[in-house]
Image (cartoon, rainbow, N blue to C red):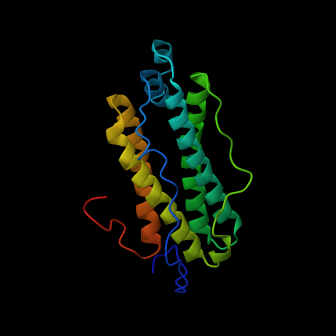
Amino acid sequence: MSFLTNDDGDLLSRPQPRRLFLGQSGLLLSGAAVALLAGRDALAAKGAATPSDLQILNTALGAELEAVAAYQLGADSGLLLKPTLDLAVTFQGHHKAHAGILSATIVKLGGKPVEAKAKYDFPVDTLKTQADVLRFAAGLEKGAVSAYLGAVPLFRDRELAKAAASILGDEAMHWAVLRNALGEEPVPAAFMG
């Protein structure tokens, strides 16, 4: 048992991973998108976004907005003890930052960012304990790790790959911390696959 859990044994049997938003798309972002994602607005004028650039950015934005909503669900559940609630709010802030840069990039490239859904299909009825909420969040983070892992090698521009790898690292740390909070091995394997 971790100091962040109340070990009552009532865990979800299977985490619900966030949809993989980049791994199977086969789409690449332009140099302009790379520059914007890397925070280099001055480079934005060097290229123009393609419809596929905007599509992949909006799909990633949708997944980040879903993560923000999921962490809000956990925070509002009343099931999280103070240290765990603080952790959930911190991780939600990371996802808000990811969503913010994606949204700004889409706007700067002439697109229209997707908006958060009015309602997400989360397994609310199965979230009865703090451990349930942690297991749900860990499943989302594992899905995000898989999505970014699939996306990084698709990028031709190394700056974009670097930016995606940075987000991948953040998602992997979230997943490890949540697994630890559940009393599980934080890093279950030497390789992520």
Q: Residue furthest left?
A: 190
- Res 61 → quadrant: top right
Q: Is residue 164 above or below residue 42?
A: below
Extreme top residue here?
46
The image quadrant of residue 72 is bottom right
Quadrant of the image for the C terminus? bottom left
Mark count: 0
Task: Give residue 12's position: percent from left, percent from top.
Answer: 53, 77
Task: Identify the residue shown where x is 39% and y is 74%.
Answer: 184
Say left or right for 94 vs 120.
left
The residue sitting at the bottom extreme is: 8
Residue at 45% in and 13% down: 46
18 or 95: nearer the viewer:
18
Q: Which residue does the image show at 54% across and 64% down from the upper left? A: 137
What is the quadrant of the N terminus in the image?
Answer: bottom left
Foreground residue among 174 and 85: 174
Residue 122 relative to residue 179: left or right: right
Percent across and percent down for residue 88 are 58, 60
59 or 70: which is nearer to us?
59
Relative to 143, is 115 on the left or the right? right
Judged left or right of residue 102, residue 124 is right
**Residue in the image at 32% along x and 30% along y:** 158
> Whole-percent x and y of residue 7?
52, 83
Q: In the displayed structure, would residue 29 be above or below residue 73? A: above
**Residue 181: image location, x then y, percent:** 47, 71
Residue nearest the observer in this picture, 40 or 12: 12
Residue 35 figure quarter: top left
